Image (spheres, grey):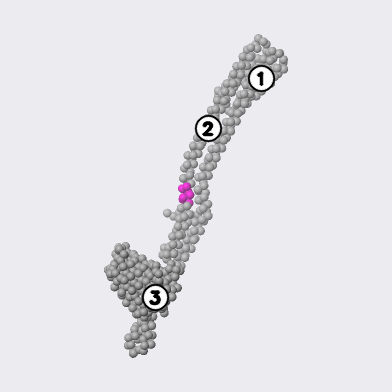
Amino acid sequence: MRIAYPGSFLKLLLIGFAMTMLPLLFAFANAALYLDQLADQSRKTVHHAVEATRASRMLAEQLTVMERSTRQYLVLGDSALLEHYETAHLKFERTILDLRNLPLDKSQRQQLEQLSNKESALFRKIGGGLSKSNAEAVVIEFIALSDTAQTILDTNNNLIDRESAVLVATAERAQHMLLWQTLPLVPLAILAALGIAFMLTRPIRLMDSAINKLGQGEYTDRIAINGPGDLRRLGERLDWLRNQLYDLEEQKKRFLRHVSHELKTPLTAIREGSELLAEEVGGKLSPQQKEICSILRDSSLRLQKMIENLLNYNAVQFQKPKLNIERVAFKPLIEDALASHALTISTKQIETTLVMAEITLHGDREKLLTVVDNLLSNAVKFTPRGGVIAIRLEQDHEVAVLDVADNGPGIAGADRARLFEPFYRGGGIYDGRISGSGLGLSIAKEYVEAHGGTISLADSDNGTRFRVTLPLNISNELQ
């Protein structure tokens, strides 16, 4: 499935940040809204409670003042005391009005109206004139009014307690609701983050895979990066680079094929001519002329070996080596490879020490011969005049182990890492007129690995030692 990406990597990052933060911001805003509502409700409840309590106590205080003023007037008969009573009455009415403006329940309003009506009736009675005969009835009515005012105060206190309980329950419900709303949002934010992370890493992984393929020389698969616009453009540049590398690789292969074949024809003529001269077909040769013929013959053999390596490398590059599996006696094969280098070994007066077990394995005889021949060719090339080449062949369980060692200058540490790379030639000094192509060890490695074996540079106190391991019975997958 093709994913629709935004135009740039920056936009994708911003979208990812927004998608990740959006659920959390929603949870935060929702929590803030509920907390604001809860705070507003708490503020109103506290305000109403304070106002109701203050007004209820004010009613009780004014009734006490009115009762005291009335009692004093009955005793002293001072009209100023009646004015004091009227002032308290006015304050009482204003307090009644304040209470009416508060959000009271039905029972509170009924009690308040009863108190107001009784106090108004008593005020009118007192205003009509007081006498000692009705003084006791007035005092009793004031006591009844005080009891009613106290009942209103108690009712307000109970209402405050109920409102407080409701407020606590509302806070708990809000807490649970916010918790259950937030819990699904957290995994949602995590899923959004994972989705954006996948969208970010997917094109990067594709580019990494494409670069690895280019590094391994795989140029056939088209590179297409599905991602933000700038990464898609980068993928297009990588595909352009792949095409350029593919063209260069094809040019190199064509060059190797043409040059190798073009060189074989004149080289064959040179070899045949040198062989005829060495056999004195054209006449008897002097010792100096024989030496020149020997040089020509050796040089043509070296050139032929280099060209064969080029052709073998070219074939390996086109496709995985195909093996013609048969039973191969390994010891005679090594002896055949030694025989092909007998003249050079004799000329350089090289001593060969052989410790070889009788081992038979399944493999491609020609390719195994090429492996041994390339190792011996290197050993002969780098072994000094009068040196020693040691060959050991032994069996280790189901594996044949071949060691080819010389006492030459050895391989520098800087050359070890690139020893099996194509066309790489180290900086070693050797006794020879023509340098190699740098393909022998690379081809040997390809052929050994095609058999399921390994080839490596083993530790040696003096010179160089290569070790080849080959399974005695090749796997069916490799045939």
* C-alpha distance separating marks 3 and 2: 97 Å
Does 475 lie within the magenta span? no
Q: Position of residue 156 (x, y in %)?
A: 57, 25
Which segment is the magenta one?
Answer: 190-196
Nearer to me, 171 or 331:
331
**Residue 104 visible at all:** yes
* Residue wearing tag 3: 383
Secondary structure under the numbered disc 3 in the rendered image: loop
Please name the residue shown 45% across and 68% down the image.
413
Helix, strand or loop for disc 2: helix
Which residue does the image show at 28% across and 68% down from the upper left?
Answer: 360
Structural distance between the alpha carbons of marks 1 and 3: 132 Å
- Identify the element where label 1 is drawn: helix
Between marks 3 and 2 in the image, the one whose residue lies nearer the viewer: 3
Question: Residue 193 magenta-drawn?
Answer: yes
Tell me the chief SS of the magenta region: helix
Q: Residue furthest top?
A: 133
If you read the primary sequence from the N terminus, does the residue marked by circle 2 or circle 1 appear first? 1
Q: Amino acid at mark 1?
A: Val
Q: Quadrant of the C terminus?
A: bottom left
Q: Position of residue 299 (x, y in %)?
A: 39, 80
Residue beneath disc 1: 65
Label 2, label 1: how far apart the Cα atoms are: 39 Å
Query: Relative to the observer, which residue lies in front, 353 or 309?
Result: 353
Q: Which residue is mark 2?
A: 168
Q: Amino acid at mark 3?
A: Thr
